[in-house]
Every structure is written in C-alpha cells, then in structure tokens.
C-alpha cells in the first residue's frame, strides 16, 4: 500500500501558497504533534486518573473535565514551542494567550481552538475532538493582540478538526478543498485516507438535540416536522442522529450527507456555539466540501466578530438541506433570524 503522509501532502501543496515560507506547514505539524499526544491519552483515559471533573468551571460556565485541561495544555505547549504563532485563543481561557518569546518574534499567525469539543462525553467513551482555526495576524509585531482574532471567518488561512474515535482522524482545509488523514499508530503518522472530501448536496440525517424542542424557534420546530413527514420524492422521513459531540456529528454528516442544527433557544437567545473557534472553522471546512453554514439566515463566515467567546446559532451541512431549513426559518420564525 502506498502511504502519503500529512507531511508529504503539505509539501506537495506548498505551491498553492507562494507567499508562504513554510510557516503554515510547520504550524500544522505542531498541531499534529499535540493531537497525537491527546489521542494517546484519550485511548487510555479509562485506565489512568484523567477522567472526571476538576471541580472548576471554565469561562463558558461549563464543568472542566481533566482531559479538557490536559488537551488545552498540550496544544498550547506545542504551539508555543513551534514558534509560528504570536497568540492563542482557547475555549478554556478567558483571555487570549500572547506568545512573547525569542522563537516567536517573526510569527505571522494566530490560532483559535476548542481543544476538546464534546468533552461532556469523555466519561462515557463517546468520540470527542479538537477544532482549530488559523488566521494571519493583523498586528505588526510583538505578542499577538485581541484584534488579531476579531476577523471574519472569510479571513481564515486554514481550519480543521481532529476526531478521536475508533481511529484518530485529521480533517483540514486551506481553502483549496478538504482532505482527511487517519493516524496510523504503527508508524505514528497521519496518512491521507480521504482525499478531496465532498459532502452530498442532500442527505437523510438531521442532527439536533430534540430534548430542547419546546425552546426552539418556530422555524426549527416546523423544519423538524418536515424531516419527520413521509414523502417518497424527497426520501423522507429523515433519520434523527445526534451524538451530542459536535465534531462526531458533523464528521458523519460531512461524509454521508445531512444537516447539523444548534439553534437559538429561550435559554440561549444568542445561540450556544462559539463563532471564533467552533462555527467559523467548521463552516470553512463544510463550504470547501460543497456544503453550507449559516445562522439560519446569514452566512456564518461573514458575521462580524466583536468578542472572543461570541456565540451564534448554527445550521450546517448539505447545501439543499440547509437551504430548506433557512426557508422554514424565514417563513415561520417570529424571532429575528440573526
């Protein structure tokens, strides 16, 4: 079998970035190093004292899991050691983490990340993941600033996610399509397994936490009922598939087709997912794979960002399904589609 490692693939694709001098390649390498370490710990988490909560609560008001802390520390350490970033933003940290070291003086990038998405599932052995987004800095020199992160999703240089499941897989884009790499533990390398990933224009799966149905906007309620109706022409009813781990749900729908919805609710009127390090990178990937990502009314990647942990609703997946969901939002939602 002919393997093409992530490193070989990146070198081949460097011609796509004539302005770059290898920094982005090294930055992706640094992310992969941390991913391998986190994957190792995820695989043995049940055997060591790394499960359960720390007793602390993060800036999002969520209970911090021990593996969350570990993953956050590993990615921060790898990014700092690599010297390609001048600042890091993480779901686990209230403020940005400026990088002021000799090695990072000429750093041209910033990274925003959710180091362990779906962490509420850690203790029950459900797939979790890492989401990351890379921007070119806007500040001129020195450690990075908050303004370096307050860029629309359209300005992303690269984005990706790592899913820690039955296999460990990295999916990323630099705006030239989407490619997936599976970690081969026998050689310790991510190898190209899913070249040029394209999501179907339509699918048969909708992913949403229906336990919150009563709190959804009317447009979402109507769309769910549409998904459940029988109609041979559109192959309905669709199947409801919701893992509760965003990366896992979106990864499945990316491959097989489907829609993932995390709308506003009466409890979360601005939405719950974070724009900078969850929705924007996932939107970049899905759009590059031929899908769509919106708030239910507006394109996710065109939203202005005013704060680090800004929240937004998310409708993401196969283009035809997202279009239909947006149509229901326009027709039936009393609330303003933000």
Image: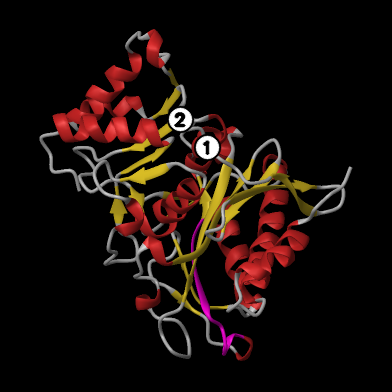
Q: In this view, does 160 lie above or below 96?
A: above
Residue 310, by quadrant, is bottom left
Is 106 within the magenta?
yes
For this orientation, the residue located farthest to the right is 1
User: Which residue is label 2 attached to?
Assistant: 258
Can residue 49 be seen at all in this image of the molecule? no
Label 1 neighbour load within 10 Å: few <14, some 14-19, many 20+ = many
The residue nearer to you, when weighing 290 against 49, is 290
Can residue 102 be seen at all in this image of the molecule? yes
Q: Residue 231 carries which label?
A: none
Nearest-to-viewer mark from 2 and 1: 1
For this orientation, the residue located farthest to the left is 334
Seen at 41% across and 32% down, the residue is 259
How many marks the image carries: the answer is 2
Q: Is residue 93 above or below residue 125?
A: below
Is 334 within the magenta?
no
The residue nearer to you, when weighing 281 against 36, is 281
Residue 327, by quadrant, is top left
Q: Which mark is residue 199?
A: 1
Label 2 neighbour load within 10 Å: few <14, some 14-19, many 20+ = many
Tag 2, which secondary structure? loop
| Segment colored magenta | 104-114
Q: Which of marks 2 and 1 is nearer the N terminus?
A: 1
**x and y, in percent, of residue 297 in the image:** 24, 44
Q: In this view, does 152 lie above or below 208?
A: below
**x and y, in percent, of residue 6 in the image:** 73, 57
State which quarter of the image contains the N terminus: top right
Seen at 37% across and 29% down, the residue is 209
User: What's the distance in space between the residues labelled 2 and 1, CA to CA?
Assistant: 9 Å
132 left or right of 210 in image: right
């Amino acid at each position: 079998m002919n393997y093409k490692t992530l490193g070989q693939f990146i070198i081949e694709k460097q011609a796509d970035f004539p302005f770059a001098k290898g920094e982005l390649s090294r930055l992706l390498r640094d992310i992969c190093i941390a991913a391998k370490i986190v994957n190792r710990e995820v695989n043995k988490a049940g055997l060591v004292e790394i499960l359960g909560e720390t007793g602390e609560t993060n800036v999002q008001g969520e209970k911090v899991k021990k593996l969350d802390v570990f993953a956050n520390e590993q990615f921060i350490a790898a990014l700092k050691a690599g010297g390609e970033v001048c600042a890091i933003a993480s779901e686990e940290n209230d403020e940005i983490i400026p990088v002021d070291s000799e090695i990072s003086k000429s750093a041209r990038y910033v990274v925003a990340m959710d180091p362990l998405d779906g962490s509420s599932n850690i203790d029950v052995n459900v797939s979790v993941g890492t989401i990351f987004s890379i921007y070119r800095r806007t500040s001129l020199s020195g450690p990075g600033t908050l303004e370096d992160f307050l860029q629309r999703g359209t300005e992303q240089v690269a984005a990706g996610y790592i899913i820690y499941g039955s296999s460990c897989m990295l999916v990323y884009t630099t705006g030239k399509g989407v490619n997936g790499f599976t970690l081969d533990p026998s050689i310790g390398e991510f190898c190209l397994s899913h070249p040029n990933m394209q999501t179907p224009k339509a699918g048969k799966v909708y992913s949403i936490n229906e336990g919150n149905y009563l709190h959804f906007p009317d447009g979402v309620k109507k769309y769910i009922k549409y998904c459940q109706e029988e109609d041979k022409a559109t192959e309905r009813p669709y199947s409801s598939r919701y893992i509760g781990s965003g990366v896992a749900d979106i990864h499945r729908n990316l491959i097989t087709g489907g829609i993932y919805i995390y709308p506003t609710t009466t409890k979360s009127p601005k939405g719950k997912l974070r724009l900078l390090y969850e929705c924007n990178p996932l939107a970049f990937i899905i759009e590059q794979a031929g899908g769509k990502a919106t708030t239910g009314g507006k394109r996710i990647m065109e939203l202005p960002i005013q704060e680090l942990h800004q929240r937004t609703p998310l409708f993401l997946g196969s283009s035809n399904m997202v279009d239909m969901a947006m149509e229901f939002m326009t027709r039936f939602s009393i609330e303003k589609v933000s």
